[in-house]
Image (cartoon, coloured by chain):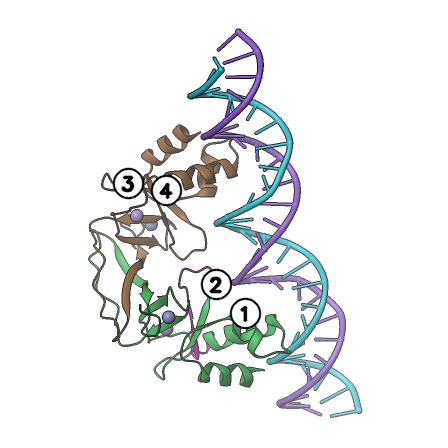
Chain colours: A green, B brown, C cyan, D purple
Amino acid sequence: MRLLVLNFLLKRKAAISLNDIEKAIQPADRITIYRTLKTFEEKGLVHLIDDGTGTHKYALCDDTCGPEEHNDLHVHFYCNGCHETYCLPNSKLPQIDLPEGFGYSEMNLVVKGYCDKCKP
Amino acid sequence: MRLLVLNFLLKRKAAISLNDIEKAIQPADRITIYRTLKTFEEKGLVHLIDDGTGTHKYALCDDTCGPEEHNDLHVHFYCNGCHETYCLPNSKLPQIDLPEGFGYSEMNLVVKGYCDKCKP
DNA sequence: TGAACAATGCAATTGCGTTGCATTGTTTTC
DNA sequence: GAAAACAATGCAACGCAATTGCATTGTTCA
Ligand SMILES: [Mn+2]
Ligand SMILES: [Mn+2]
Ligand SMILES: [Zn+2]
Ligand SMILES: [Zn+2]
């Protein structure tokens, strides 16, 4: 099961939801895939993306990630046309000026628009 | 009901969830408050915040907002200590370099950390 | 081989957003 | 002022995704 999920993720360019993985890897239980992805995330193989659509997406990490430390923090892009969510590993997270006394820990940045295939 | 919700929002400094409003304005139906907030949002009185916690938050807009046009786009901050979500109207949204062919439409940026009251 | 451990799958639960619909309240029209 | 038109409210129900419990199956190790 884990090999199936991993191989499927390797083939994908965009991030993908649990439901889509379930449909692709047919006779497989949703819960098992869910736990597989959770294990992958803990081991630093994939990262979970909250793109604001309400359903989580998953994508492979790069080589710098390991257990309990994700170092590939980057911007994500949601296309209003094809409804795909892309990792933008070349877009680093910006520095944000916080109010006095506030401490930075992490950040979630999702840009929405149209991807190169869907742009009018 | 709308006056109750509005007055409550005016008193708050942080954004607030539907559940919290319901608890504060006691004998009031959740659905009614939900629809009140939806009306407020359409009229440009409040904006909805997706801070990644899974539950939406609401906060008052500034004077520049009107029906169907929200002009007070800004960064939001989620405190890992008090679990409050704050608007940061002074932090403008940054410019992000997108890949060739990608078009920008909007953006959601949530910074997480500790607020001034919770900072260790 | 048998015990210990890990992975799987089914069922059920939770939490939140959302909608349908009947009821109540308010405004407009005659 | 009564009737009709419209808007707001409240209860029930639904939908969807994430999550957990628990029994079953498969694998590893003594
Ligand atoms: Mn990513
Ligand atoms: Mn805000
Ligand atoms: Zn697209
Ligand atoms: Zn705080």
Which sits in the foreground, A7 or D26? A7
Side of A70 where A33 appears, left or right:
right
Task: Please state the extent of the stretch shown in magenta in the rendering.
Answer: A43-55
* Residue C20 at x, y percent in the picture: 60, 43
* Residue A108 at x, y percent in the picture: 33, 63
Label 2, residues with CA under 10 Å away: few <14, some 14-19, many ≥20: few
Contact (Cβ within 8 Å) of mark 2 with mark 1: yes
Dot 4 falls on which chain?
A: B
Dot 1 falls on which chain?
A: A
Say which residue appears at 22% left-offset and 70% top-offset: B97
* Residue C2 at x, y percent in the picture: 78, 86
Amino acid of disc 3: Gly
Q: Which mark is residue B42?
A: 4
Amino acid of disc 4: Glu
Mark 3 lies within 8 Å of ligand 2 (Cβ measured): no
Q: Nearer the viewer, mark 1 or mark 3?
A: 3
Q: Nearer the viewer, mark 1 or mark 4?
A: 4
Element at label 1: helix
Report which residue position mark 2 lands on: A55
Residue B54 position (above or below residue B28):
below
Q: How far apart are labels 2 and 1 at the CA level? A: 9 Å
Q: How far apart are labels 1 and 3 at the CA level? A: 38 Å
Quadrant containing the N terminus of chain B in the rendered view: top left
Amino acid of disc 2: Thr
